[in-house]
Every structure is written in C-alpha cells, then in structure tokens.
Amino acid sequence: MKIDVLLGLQWGDEGKGKVVDVLTPAYDIVARFQGGPNAGHTLEFDGKKYVLRSIPSGIFQQGALNLIGGGVVLDPVLFEEEAKALEASGVDITKKLKISKKAHLILPTHRLLDAANEKAKGAGKIGTTGKGIGPTYTDKVSRNGLRLGDLFHDFDTKYAAARNRHLSMLRALGQEPDPEELAKLEERWMQALDYLRQFDIIDNEHFINHQLAEGKKVLCEGAQGTMLDIDFGSYPFVTSSNTITAGACTGLGVAPNKIGDVYGIFKAYCTRVGSGPFPTELFDETGKKIRDIGHEYGAVTGRERRCGWVDLVALKYAIMLNGVTKLIMMKSDVLDTMDEVKACVAYEINGERVDEFPFSVEEETLKPIYVTLPGWKENLSKSTTYDELPERFKEYVAFLEKELGVPIVILSVGPDRKQTIVRE
C-alpha cells in the first residue's frame, strides 16, 4: 500500500480539515506530519463547528486511527485543551490517537522567545502567532530540542538545560521573565505533560510502515500551505517546517516510493495571514467582500486574512513541487455574487512577462496579469451533483483545469461536510 497526501497549495487556510474529514471514511489511519498548534483546521457538521490545532482531522470518523507524527511540534497545554474539548463532545480520543516519540515539545520559554524575537524585528516582523513554534523548530535544527520521547529518558535534566539556555537568550534580548509568572506557566505545562502520558506514545516510523505492510490505507494531513514552506515558500515570511509532500516522508519516516496520490487543495480565490508578499492581494471593496462572505478570519488567532484573486503562477509552482495528482477547490460559493472573476496567469516584473514563480515576489516590482471570466451569479451551495452546477461555473472549473494540467476532483460549495461535490 501507498500513503496518500493531502496538503494546501496556497498560503494555508485552504480548508484541509473539512476535506480530510470527508475523505477519512476511505482510510484506516490519518496522520499529521508537520507544523504546530498555529494550524487551525475547521470542521462543521451537525450544526456545530470544531477547530483542531494539533490533532488530525480524521478524529471524528468512526474506525480511523489518528497519528501525530514526529515532524509536528506539540504544546502540551494547548494539546490538553484541544483533547478535552473533543472528549466533552463525545470523542474517545485516547483510543483513537497515537503520538510520535520524536515530536518536539514547545516549552513555556519557547513562547517567550517567540514574542521577544518578533519585538526585536520591529517593522520587519514575520507576523507569527506567538505560540513558540519557530523557536521550537530552531532548537530542533540546532540539536537543542526536547522531544516527547525524552519523557522516558532523563527528562528533568534535559528540561533544565533547555530552560536555562532559553533564559540566557531572553536576557540577551533584554527580556527578563517575571519569576512568578514563569513558575505558573511551568506548573501548568508539567500538569499537561502528565495528561499526555496517558496516550500511546510510539515510534511512529515503525508503526506507519508496519501498517502499510499489512495493507492499511493511510492519509497524511499537512498543515499551513505550500507557499509557507521553509525552503520553497515566500522566505522569510514562511513557517518553520516543510509543508510540501517531501515533508510527509521526513515527518512520518516513510520512503518517497511509498507516496501514492497527492491531493492539492486551493481556494477559488486566495488568502494570506500575516506579513509577506501576496501578488494578487485586493485592497478594494472586492477584497473586503470576499473576506466578509468567506468569513476569512484565522481559526486559531481570529486575525483578518488578506484576500485576493486566485494566483495560477503560484499554483502551478505548488503543483510541481508536490507532485499533485488530484486537485480540490474550496469555497467556490464565496464568489457566487461576483459579476466577474479573475485569475492571475502571469506576472509582469520590471516590464517583462514571467510565467514561472520567481525567487522574489516583491510587490513594488511585480504586477499580476489577469484573465477575466464572467461570474456565474447563482447560489452553488444548493447543488449536490456536478450536473446541477451553473454552466459559467463549470467554465471556470474547465479554465482552471486547462491552465493547471491536473483534474479538479472535489468541489466544496459550502462549509458543511455535506456541501461537497465529488466528480470522480
């Protein structure tokens, strides 16, 4: 058996949680392979809304096992809050969730470092969520990290070394934590570690490969989006992990030849949170209209998302990097009332047409080149089959497929799991 991968092709917030929830019945295991609790995956069904941060979106489906892989960074406090909220809704989470020993832990001092680093950058700040994710990945790469498996290997000594190192770094940044406040944070953090101990903490690389050998079907769930990848995204305004398909191999311990289908998710338009370049961003009433209709606010932070037209230059780049075999378009219904819909097909940089995503996409030297299509001006959310969709919307889908060279197999026409049209 091969692992299928599902990931975002834009700057995150594409709607991965809903699609994982929809696809999960066909899989035995859903595995999260990277990222931290800044990734809010929103699911809506039975009139309720759920936001998952670290726990895979397959947790609500009967029968599926869920795995937090070694490429994830985990905040014990936020994890406990998330898990207990699921327990309160009736999910038997301890039986359905396994966690990798190799997942790195976000310490209380990581969050303090995150805030101090952003403050030190001033106007050049990245726009992080302040949850300590960047400093945790920094420690991982510099070989100073603390992993979940360290709970069973001289943990107290390792924690003290990491804590003292962080305090020295904070003092160098002119930030001296209040001892009483830090003590409270640490006490709560240690309590959350005790809660974590009740879960099945495993060597996930052996587990996942054994499951594949036994013929089990696995779906990997990515966090954030391709354009936030640490290596191939709009650096330095990126996240701290590999959000592309290759990250599933390193985050779960599977070989590249084990990858099967790659589902690439994108919105019918485009959004971005935080700082950084965004070639198709709209600063007018149309951008505001998309934000309001699409409820484009961060699932975890509540921050306004920047909105713009779909960027096919960036999408083609993301499809190439990920080896996408099937596309999924989300939030098509948000554009229902538009008189016309635009798609960026190239950039103009210093007077020259550029068809491939460049090293730098600085706003002052780049202009998007658009193709304009007529809007469909009909309510998509009532449609249950592809045949029921308006012809102008089908023309938009056909245009995108021709430009991108990959079939769009799933269309989301509303937030509920039932408002999903499968074309296969």
Image (cartoon, rainbow, N blue to C red):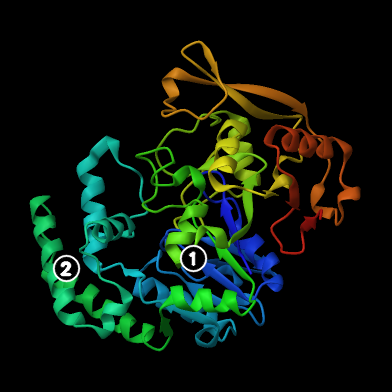
The quarter of the displayed image where residue 96 is located: bottom right
Locate the N terminus and report the quarter of the image it occupies. Answer: bottom right
Circles 1 and 2: CB atoms closer than 8 Å? no
Q: Examine the rendered structure and indicate whether residue 116 appears above or below residue 340.
A: below
Q: Examine the rendered structure and indicate whether residue 287 appears above or below residue 64.
A: above
Please state if 223 lies on the left or on the right of 391 as rendered: left
The residue closer to the viewer here, 197 or 281, is 197
Question: Which numbered circle lies on residue 254?
Answer: 1
The residue closer to the viewer here, 211 or 193, is 211
The residue closer to the viewer here, 88 or 346, is 346
Locate the C terminus and report the quarter of the image it occupies. Answer: bottom right
Q: Which amino acid lies under the numbered mark 1 shown in the image of this protein?
A: Val
Q: Which residue is mark 2?
A: 162
Mark 1 vs mark 2: which is more N-terminal? 2
The quarter of the displayed image where residue 167 is located: bottom left
Q: What residue is shown at x 40% (from left), y 68% (from top)?
A: 70
Place of residue 76 in the rendered image (x, y in percent of width and height, measured from the top left)? 35, 75
Q: Which amino acid lies under the numbered mark 2 shown in the image of this protein?
A: Ala
Question: Which numbered circle lies on residue 207?
Answer: none
Please state if 108 lies on the left or on the right of 214 as rendered: left
Place of residue 241 in the rendered image (x, y in percent of width and height, measured from the top left)? 39, 54
Please state if 299 lies on the left or on the right of 410 as rendered: left
Please state if 100 lies on the left or on the right of 331 as rendered: left
The crowd level at tag 1 (other Cα within 10 Å; few <14, some 14-19, many 20+) is many
Q: What residue is shown at x 31% (from left), y 81% (from top)?
A: 193
The residue closer to the viewer here, 323 or 423, is 323
Tell me the SS state at disc 1. loop
Place of residue 261 in the rendered image (x, y in percent of width and height, measured from the top left)? 65, 57
The crowd level at tag 2 (other Cα within 10 Å; few <14, some 14-19, many 20+) is some
In the displayed image of the protein, which residue is found farthest to the right? 387
Residue 202 appears in view? yes
